[in-house]
Image (cartoon, rainbow, N blue to C red):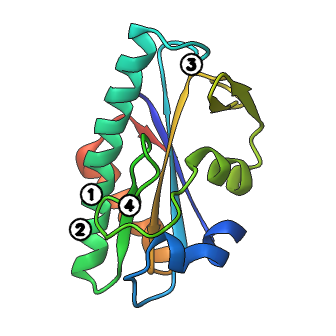
Amino acid sequence: MRMQYSVHSPTQFIQTYADQLLPDWSQPILSILVVLQQCSSLMLSRTLATETQKRQGREQFLQFGHQVALELESLGYLADLFDPATGWPLRSPPGRLHLDDVAVVRAALQYPTMAQGDCTLVIHPDWESAVYPSVLVSSAPLSLLETIAAQVSDRYLLDLHH
């Protein structure tokens, strides 16, 4: 799956509710990494193909995101991935709130969204609804997260574009 990523300041929701998303964090969230993966089919309905795409997208994000998190943690920063399937953090104890990755993409990138059944889809300018979004948060400065994401993408994902 082709991937794109971008680094942003935390969204207003993340800033406001950080203590309810990641209650054990001792450092503020200073940066977020939005990862978008192009799917081979539009995500308009729940089919075997779309469920397979979601599973593959989640696995690829977890591989990439965990490597980014490990690099940041080795430098003394906190980092966590939010499970795209549940919205709960994967490396820290969960708080009372889960993170809506589609809402983060909408706020960070200004991409439109579309309600589809019980899901909300990101509408990518080139990929339409054939996109799988995911989010990592960090206490690292924006420039460091950008550097680490680029290094990890160069090492682990040959087809990653940002």
Q: Which residue carries the number 4 mark?
A: 89
Separation (CA) of disc 4 from disc 2: 15 Å
The label nearer to you, 1 versus 3, is 3
Question: Residue 66, which numbered label?
Answer: 1
SS of the residue under disc 3 = loop
Q: Earlier in the sequence, mark 2 or mark 3?
A: 3
- Few, some or many residues within 10 Å of mark 3 (<14, 14–19, 20+): many
SS of the residue under disc 2 = helix
130 vs 111, left or right, is left
- Amino acid type at mark 4: Pro
- Amino acid type at mark 3: Met
Separation (CA) of disc 1 from disc 3: 25 Å
Residue 46 higher or lower than 31, as above or below: above
Image coordinates of residue 159 in percent, x first then y, are 37, 34
Identified at 64% across, 31% down, the residue is 121
Let me know if residue 142 appears in the view: no
User: Looking at this rendering, what residue extends furthest in the bottom direction?
Assistant: 26
